[in-house]
Amino acid sequence: MKLFSTIALAAALVAVPVHTSRAAQSTDADAHWVGAWGWVASPPQPGPAPTRVAPQPPPLGVPPPAPPAPAPAAPRPPLLENPGGLPVDFAPGVLANVTLRQIVRVSASGSRVRLRLSNESSGDVQVIGDVHLALAGPDGAIVAGSDRAVTFDGQARVAIPAGAPVLSDPIALDVRALDRLAVSVFVPGQAAVRGARTLWTYVPSAPGDLTGATSLPGAHLRRAPVYATLVEVDAPHTSAVVTLGDSITEGDGSTGNAFHAWPDRLADRLAALPGPDRWSVVNAGISGNRVLRYGSGPDALARFDRDVLSVPGVRVIVLLEGINDIGRGFAPTGDREPVTAVALEAAYRQIIERAHAHGIRVLGATLTPYKGAFYASDSGEAAREATNAWIKTSGAFDGVIDFAAVVADPNDPLSFAPAFNDRDHLHPNDAGYKAMADAIDLRLITGR
């Protein structure tokens, strides 16, 4: 009762009703909604810190851990697609009474779009003011004539309950696969900054509702809240691939706002295929995420329903996750959080079984090298190799993608090839992500 009274009070104060039921339903029985772009809302906040397992002495006969690895280098400014040279704001903080313009890239074609806005990482009601959708122009501008006001059950504003998403009404807008769209969201209240590593938001220097502005005055780029977490397109003959993983799937290390992560590059390849049957790609990677334990959001098993099964049209999953479980499990410094290859394999089987129950195929991807990374260790490397051997030989997956072999240094297979990693021995660069996507046999996805 307390939750509902809180929601009702928040909605009444801003004269915005809470809408959930009709917005979640298609207004056309013949519609074929499919996920065409995605980003995962995480981590949940506020909330208790994850429980950690106390350090344990090694079993008898197991050598002591390797000496502490050197501290990771200070982070450098990220590569960022910014042709206009707009100012970039790195400062954390709180934004309020502000318009946020987020650029997304859809991977399906159609004449109607709808948005999923998320409040899943918050414990409070989130009031959203006007929302607009348009084709994206340069430097945070929109293409003239393409601007559309977005509604929720016919209303311009919506109060999203704590921990929940909300779907918009269908929006009439012709889009083509690989089009970039601008999602402009006015937040009349406060929005804590918790942006994605590879998505930078255009923020104007002026306060207030500027969602319909062709160009944002004094625009600068900032890691700001990401409210649009899924774009759906009414796209006949189209199915979705969901890429489930951690930062290597989210695209950490690639050029921000350029859509150069391996799922984006995969979308490029699928969009170029001939024939009437089409495939879109939805990225469900979270930096720092793990399969078995809390890590920058709920573990893969805990978030599977929310981040995979809720994507309309999903028929294939590409699973690349586990390196953070291994790295943290055998970290040479700090608390260890024990994990074994056998435990990861059991978790993978759980994901496969849950996906198969919904008619979804699962492709397993081998864990990429991490020698020299801040949490690398000999024990962890042994677990990675055992896990990869199981992925390739168990027959549990519907297909296997050997990403590890693609990006490894031929002279030292435990390390990244220098051409594919610039900074941390863990995350690919743009070239590495492209090599990963180019190595995928598309027949594993399309069946032809």
Image (cartoon, grey):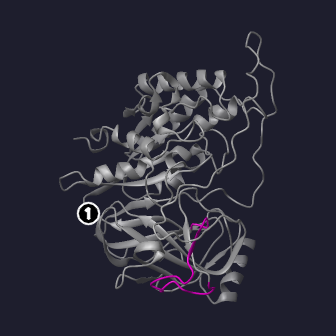
Amino acid type indicated by mark 1: Pro
In the image, what residue occupies the spot 34% across and 41% down? 438
Q: Is residue 6 above or below residue 304?
A: below
| Quadrant in which residue 382 is drawn | top right
Q: Examine the residues drawn in magenta and state their main secondary structure.
A: loop
Q: Which residue is mark 1?
A: 236
The residue nearer to you, when weighing 236 against 256, is 256
Q: How far from the left and from the top, in percent, is residue 249? A: 50, 46
Question: Crowding at label 1, few (<14), some or many (≥20) Cα neighbours within 10 Å?
Answer: some
Q: Position of residue 88 (x, y in %)?
A: 60, 67
> Looking at the picture, does residue 250 appear above or below residue 218?
above
Give above or below for 112 relative to 216: above
Quarter of the image containing the N terminus? bottom right
- The vertical placement of 407 against 182, above or below, is above
> Residue 291's x, y, as percent?
59, 39
For this orientation, the residue located farthest to the front is 85
Residue numbers of the magenta segment = 206-226
Q: Residue at position x 42%, y 22% from top?
A: 393
| Residue at the bottom extreme of this rendering | 15
Can the viewer see residue 404 in this picture?
A: no
Residue 247: image x %, image y %?
56, 46
Magenta residue check for 218: yes
Q: Residue lying at the far left in this picture: please name it.
A: 275
Q: In the drawing, does residue 339 fall left or right of residue 133?
A: right
Left or right, residue 432 beside residue 448: right
User: Magenta span has 368?
Assistant: no
The residue sitting at 51% across, 83% down in the picture is: 211
For mark 1, give the secondary structure.
Answer: loop
